[in-house]
Amino acid sequence: MESLSAGAVKAKAKSLGFHKLGIAPASALDQDVEHLRRWLDLGYAADMDWMHDSRRQDIRQVLPDVKSVIVVAMNYNSIQATETHGDAKISRYAQGRDYHKVLGKPLHHFARWIDEQVPGTTSRSYVDTGPIQEKAWAQAAGIGWIGKNACLITLEYGSWVFLGEVLTTLQLTPDLPHSNYCGTCTRCLTACPTQAIVKPKIIDSRRCLAYQTIENRSKELPSEIVESQNNWVVGCDLCQTCCPYNQRAERQGNFTDIIDFEPRTPWPDLSLEKLAEISDEQFDLWTRGSAIRRVKAQGLRRNAAAVLKFLHTKHSSHNQKGAK
Ligand code: B12
Ligand code: SF4
Ligand code: SF4
C-alpha cells in the first residue's frame, strides 16, 4: 500500500538538486532482458566481465521484494565545457567532479529519507555502482528515451545527463515509459568515427573510443582505433554533440546549475605531449575527485602517446610522398 505520494517523492528529489525524476514498476523490464543477453553473447561487452553479472538481468536479485525503481537524472552540461584541452580531447562527462560522488551522496540521503517516511521500507541507491540497466530503467520511468546513439536522451537536457536510481520496497504510482523521438534521424550513426553503433541503439564496445580510452587495460590500443582516435584521450562525445536534441538544449540555454560539474583546472590547457609523459604522482594530484581516475595514469599516457605516434607517422609518410 502506498503511504508516500509520488508527488512528495518528486518534490524531495528536486530539493536535493536532481533535474528529473521518474518511477517505474519493478516488473517494467521483465520482457526486455533478451536484448542484454544478446548483446553479451555477441561479445559487445568486450572484457567488461562485470556486465555478465546475472543480477543485471533481474532487479529482484539486487533487492528482493523491490516494488518500485525511482530514477533520477542530473544535467551535467556546463556552459564552459569544451572538448579540447590544449590539443587533447576529454569528453564532457569527465570534466567536472566525478558523477558517482556528485549524485551518490544526495541519492543515498534520498533513500534514507524514504525509509524514514515509511518505516518498514527498504531502499537502496545506485549511481553506476550496481548491476542495474540504468538507461532502460530511465526509459521505463519516463525520464527520456534510448536514442540510436544508445544514450538516454531527455527533451530538456538532451543526453547530457547522469542517471541514478533508488530501488525501494515501497509501492509508488509509476510514470509512463517515454516515447522515442529519434524518428528518421541518423546523424549519430554517421558521426561515429569507428562504426561502433552497429545498429540503432546497439554499441559494440570493442569499436567504441569511450571503451577503448577508458576501460581497455591493454598496453596498446588497437591500430584501427588509433586511426580514428582524433585526439580523444578520455571518452568520446561525437555521437552526442551531433544530436539535434543536445544542440537544442544548448540553444535553449539548458546548462547545468551544479557547480561541481564545471570543468576543473588544470585540464583546460593540457597538451598531448604532457599527457603522454604524465607521472603517476601528477596524475594522482590532478585527478582527485575526478572520473578520469578510472582511466589510470598508464591508460592516459597510452592514449596520448597513441595519438602522437599516429600523427608523427602520418606526418612522416606525407613528407616522404612530398619528397618523391
Ligand atoms: C557498459 C557501459 C558503457 C559501455 C557500453 C555502452 C553502451 N551503450 O552500452 C561503454 C564503455 C562503451 C560506455 C560508453 C559511454 N558511457 Co557508459 N555505461 C555503461 C553502463 C555501465 C552499462 C550500460 C549497459 O547496460 N549496456 C548494455 C546494453 C545492452 O544496454 P543498453 O544500452 O541500456 O540497451 C538496452 C536497450 O537499448 C534495449 N535494446 C537493446 N537493443 C535493442 C534492440 C531493440 C530492437 C529494442 C526494442 C531494444 C533494444 O535493451 C537493452 C537492455 O535493456 C552504464 C551504467 C549502468 N549501470 O547502466 C553507463 C552509462 C550508460 N554510461 C554513461 C556515459 C556518460 C557514457 C559515455 C557518454 C561516456 C563518454 N562520453 O565517453 C559513453 C557513451 C557511448 C554510447 N554511445 O553509448 C551514462 C549514460 C547517460 C546517458 N544519458 O545515457 C551511464 C548511464 C552512466 C550513468 N550513471 O550516468 N558505457
Ligand atoms: S562514443 Fe564515439 S566511438 Fe563510441 S559510439 Fe559514440 S561516436 Fe562512436
Ligand atoms: S543523433 Fe538523431 S538518431 Fe542519433 S540519438 Fe540523436 S536524434 Fe536519435
Image (spheres, rainbow, N blue to C red):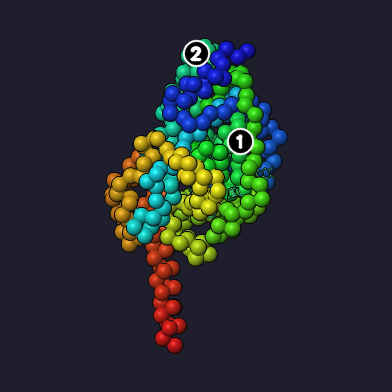
Circle on res. 272: none
Q: Helix, strand, or loop for circle 1?
A: helix
Residue at mark 2:
117
Observer able to see residue 101: no
Q: Residue at x 39, y 44 (%)?
A: 79
Question: Residue 219: image x %, image y %?
Answer: 44, 59
Q: Residue at x 56, y 38 (%)?
A: 155
Residue type highlighted by circle 1: Gln
| Ligand 1 under 8 Å from disc 1 Cβ | yes
Question: Residue 53: image x %, image y %?
Answer: 58, 38
Lateral position of residue 106 relative to residue 118, left or right: left
Residue at mark 1:
139
**Quadrant of the snapshot with the N terminus:** top right
State which mark lies toward you, 2 or 1.
1
- Depth check: 293 or 86 in front? 86
Q: Find residue 102 and report its image quarter.
A: top left
Q: Find residue 179 and report its image quarter.
A: top right
Mark found first going from the N terminus, 2 or 1: 2
